[in-house]
Image (cartoon, grey):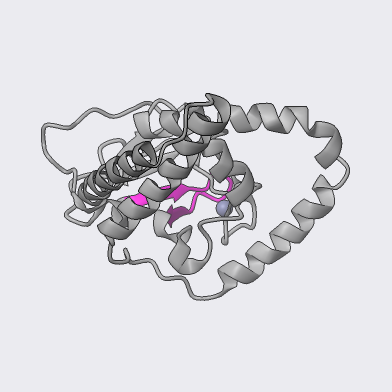
Amino acid sequence: MSFDKSKYKVWTWKNPLVLHWIINPGLAFNELLLGQRVPKITLIEKDSKKPLAERTFVPCPYCGTLHSSLKWTPQNNTAFKNWFGLYCDNCHKIIPCVRNLTSLVVIVLTFPVWYWFKDRWKQDWLKTQEVKFSKPLVLTQPEFKWWYVGLRFAFFMFVITSLFNYVFFREEFTWKSLFLDSVSWIIGGLIFGIVMKKISGSNLSNRGEKKTQQAT
Ligand SMILES: [Zn+2]
């Protein structure tokens, strides 16, 4: 597919956010268990005053529809369970997504397990998508609760790092270190929430940023 590069910035795997999705092993959890997916191509409308999410589009390579990225969000109950990719509600095909490297390894290693029921599962999944996407979808950005996003992130990171420290690295457990860890994660999480709010709410239409990436 070719896109009007004067109108859209094209994000592919070369974009740092997408690349992060591919290489961060922790995100295999989101991809394999939660079914969260990142499309291979994302278009960002340039020179627009709208918030980032409202000018982010996902093109369908089969029918050419430019979908609002807000189609796949928790508010529409469509952000997760996208194990086979993002469903195009126009042509009923599956928009290709990038693959996290760790999940790729897990998928290859568990091949003998899932191979036998994948076709059946895919058919059922496609039927579920049709039902989900036949309902009216909300395509405006929900209010961003930065503190909620930050604390959820902090809790998640706290659990993961504690698990690593005490179980895998066998660090000596003390209540003091657990307390200090939780405090630092709460602070870190709140900073993360503020940064995410800035990213999602900012309109990156500053004239200096004119670099576009080639679609592959
Ligand atoms: Zn389509």
Where residue 19 appears, x then y in whole percent?
Answer: 43, 28
State left or right for residue 13 relative to residue 108. Answer: left
Q: Residue furthest right?
A: 116
Where residue 40 appears, x then y in whole percent?
Answer: 50, 36
State left or right for residue 65 relative to residue 191. Answer: right
Q: Is residue 60 above or below residue 164?
A: below
The structure residue drawn at horizontal position 31% and vertical position 63%, both measured from the top left corner, is 141
Where residue 206 appears, x then y in whole percent?
Answer: 12, 40
User: Can the viewer see residue 96?
Assistant: no
Where residue 77 appears, x then y in whole percent?
Answer: 52, 66
Q: Which residues are magenta?
A: 56-68
Tell which of 44 and 157 is nearer to you: 157
Based on the picture, tell me whether residue 57 belongs to the magenta stretch. Answer: yes
The structure residue drawn at horizontal position 44% and vertical position 47%, both measured from the top left corner, is 156
The structure residue drawn at horizontal position 42% and vertical position 41%, both measured from the top left corner, is 157
Q: Residue furthest left?
A: 207
Based on the picture, tell me whether residue 52 belongs to the magenta stretch. Answer: no
Q: Residue furthest bottom?
A: 136
Tell which of 157 and 110 is nearer to you: 157
Q: Is residue 76 above or below residue 51?
A: below
Q: Is residue 158 above or below residue 126?
A: above
User: Can the viewer see residue 158?
Assistant: yes
Q: Quadrant of residue 215?
A: top left
Q: Is residue 5 above or below residue 52?
A: above
The count of marks equals 0
